[in-house]
Amino acid sequence: MKPYACYPGARARFQPMHSNVRSPYNFNVPFTSGKETRPAANIVRNEGSFEIQLAVPGFAKDQIKIEVNEDQLIVTATNPNQDDQKLKFIRQEFEALSFKRVFRLHRNANSSALKASFDQGILTIIIPDKEPETIKIAIQ
């Protein structure tokens, strides 16, 4: 089966795109800046806790703020140099853009016992589970 057989002219349209994808170092290739303002996140379920890992390269830990508002964990970062355009880029594929990420906390999360660490551009937030509440019921 030929992949483009049912779409005449598709091969001619898509071939340049496939070539550009295979050649990431071709500086003459037009591209969009696609400024992503959401850092990539990993969410891990551990025994007794959740762990959120955010990739935030280019930020210092004093530029990052973590807050809990009801059932939401809010992570924001601001880059004061974001609009500083002193450098004349030939090609710019990344920059440390200000961002805000909001995560809904699990109903079992102990939001008052959060712990956070920052190492080599990775922000790690540990959200421990609440201790199970035991309710004693009187027998009548």
Image (tube, rainbow, N blue to C red):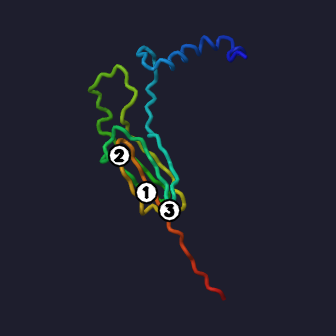
Quadrant containing the C terminus in the rendered view: bottom right
The residue where tag 2 is placed is: 119
- Comparing labels 2 and 1, the label whose residue is closer to the camera: 2
Separation of marks 3 and 2 at Cα, in angstroms: 24 Å
The residue where tag 3 is placed is: 129
Separation of marks 1 and 3 at Cα, in angstroms: 15 Å
Residue 55 shown left or right of residue 58 in the figure: right
Give the mark, 2 or 1, whose residue is nearer the N terminus: 1
Q: Residue at x 32, y 33 (%)?
A: 83
Q: Amino acid at mark 1?
A: Val
Please tell me which residue lies in front, 15 or 64.
15
| Residue that sits furthest to the front in the current view | 47
| Residue that sits furthest to the left in the current view | 86
The residue where tag 1 is placed is: 68
Q: Compared with residue 78, is residue 113 higher up or lower down, i.e. above or below? A: below
In the rendered image, residue 78, in percent from the top left (x then y), is placed at: 34, 42
Q: Determine the secondary structure under disc 3.
A: loop
Quadrant containing the N terminus in the rendered view: top right
Separation of marks 2 and 1 at Cα, in angstroms: 22 Å
- Using the image, tell me which numbered label, if any, was put on residue 95: none
Could you tell me if the residues under marks 2 and 1 are in contact, i.e. CB atoms within 8 Å?
no
Could you tell me if the residues under marks 1 and 3 are in contact, i.e. CB atoms within 8 Å?
no
Give the mark, 3 or 2, whose residue is nearer the N terminus: 2
Give the mark, 1 or 3, whose residue is nearer the N terminus: 1
Q: Determine the secondary structure under disc 1.
A: strand
Q: Amino acid at mark 3?
A: Asp
Q: Compared with residue 115, is residue 134 higher up or lower down, i.e. above or below? A: below
Q: Residue at x 51, y 19 (%)?
A: 22
